[in-house]
Amino acid sequence: MEPKLQRRVQRYGWNKAAASYESFWAEQLRPAQDLMLALADLHPGERVLDVACGTGLVTFRAAEAVGASGFVAGSDISEDMVASVAAGAAARGIIGEFRRSDAETLEHPDADFDAVLCGLGLMYVAHPPNAMREMHRVLKPGGRAAAVVWGARKNCGWAEIFSIVERRTTSDVCPMFFQLGTGGTIAADFRSAGFGEVHDQRISVPIVFPSAEAAIGAAFIGGPVALAHSRFDDVTRESAYAEYLDSIEPFRKGAAYHVPGEFVAVVARR
């Protein structure tokens, strides 16, 4: 997909998903976020930027880690996500800076942050190495970047969602979605972006959905195919739901689905 079009698709798609994202994914993504934050090792008083911040699931935890003497900023390509994180910050009494911004062109000065985070956002960037170079640019010397992405396609039991959607409409999902999580790709890309002391870690965890409705909502409404899903008529929607549930049927335990998931996290120092 042409980069300009991909960025527009991501913006509109995540605007569609913004209202539902947390309800379907907050608990399911916590292990990945736990790992990334552990690698980031944030300290009180630090300045932190959360790239592709979404609704603030990572941002608010970062704010807690750096405390009142620290500072958090968040950026996201979706204005609806930015509105959500800004409202959540205000409700929590967090004084931060939140703006709509593409990860490849961060609107922050050079050497402005002690740490930059990106939790499950790099897969959607048109050119991830550009985003990594931007993360490097806005870090202070000695600062660190921490990111996490989904792992290899073969290890993510929900991955059939993409081909299911593609068979019904033009896909809006990045064709290289799983590339960063395959082998040592993400670590190699961070090194190529100028980082040193690069370390990656891979974990396998079940992604648990308590019901078929929750599994469907996460896959189609609160995630990366939300824009494509919005084009479905009722017949197409029901057939897609049925095919997706068939694809994750091997992972059903009673009413719940324990779908295999894999994440790769990396920490790198400027």
Image (cartoon, grey):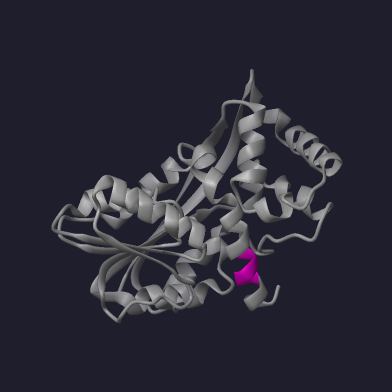
In magenta stretch: residue 8: yes
- Is 118 one of the magenta-colored residues? no
Give x and y (percent) for residue 12: 62, 62
**Relative to residue 173, is residue 101 drawn left or right?**
left
Residue 178 or residue 86, whichever sits in front: 86
Quadrant occupied by the C terminus: bottom left
x, y percent for residue 228: 73, 54
The residue lying furthest to the right in this view is: 235
Answer with the quarter of the image where residue 222 lies: top right
Left or right of 98? Residue 6 is: right
Above or below 251: residue 119: below
**Residue furthest out toward the top:** 254
208 vs 25, nearest the viewer: 25
Position of 171 with respect to 42 (left or right) is right
Q: What residue is rendered at 78% in x and 48% in y? A: 164
Look at 46% across and 61% down and name the residue there: 52
**Depicted 110 relative to depicted 120: above or below:** below
* Secondary structure mainly formed by the magenta segment: helix
Which of these two is toward me, 164 or 181? 164
Image spot of residue 244 (x, y percent): 75, 38
Query: What residue is at 82 percent from the left and 40 percent from the top?
Result: 234
In which image quadrant can residue 266 be found?
A: bottom left
Instruction: Point out the stretch of residues depicted in magenta.
Output: 6-10
Residue located at (57% from left, 57% from top): 15
For the image shown, how many numbered marks are present on the structure?
0
Whether residue 179 is visible: no
In which quadrant will I find the N terminus? bottom right
Residue 89 visible here: yes
- The percent coordinates of residue 72 (x first, y second) are 27, 60
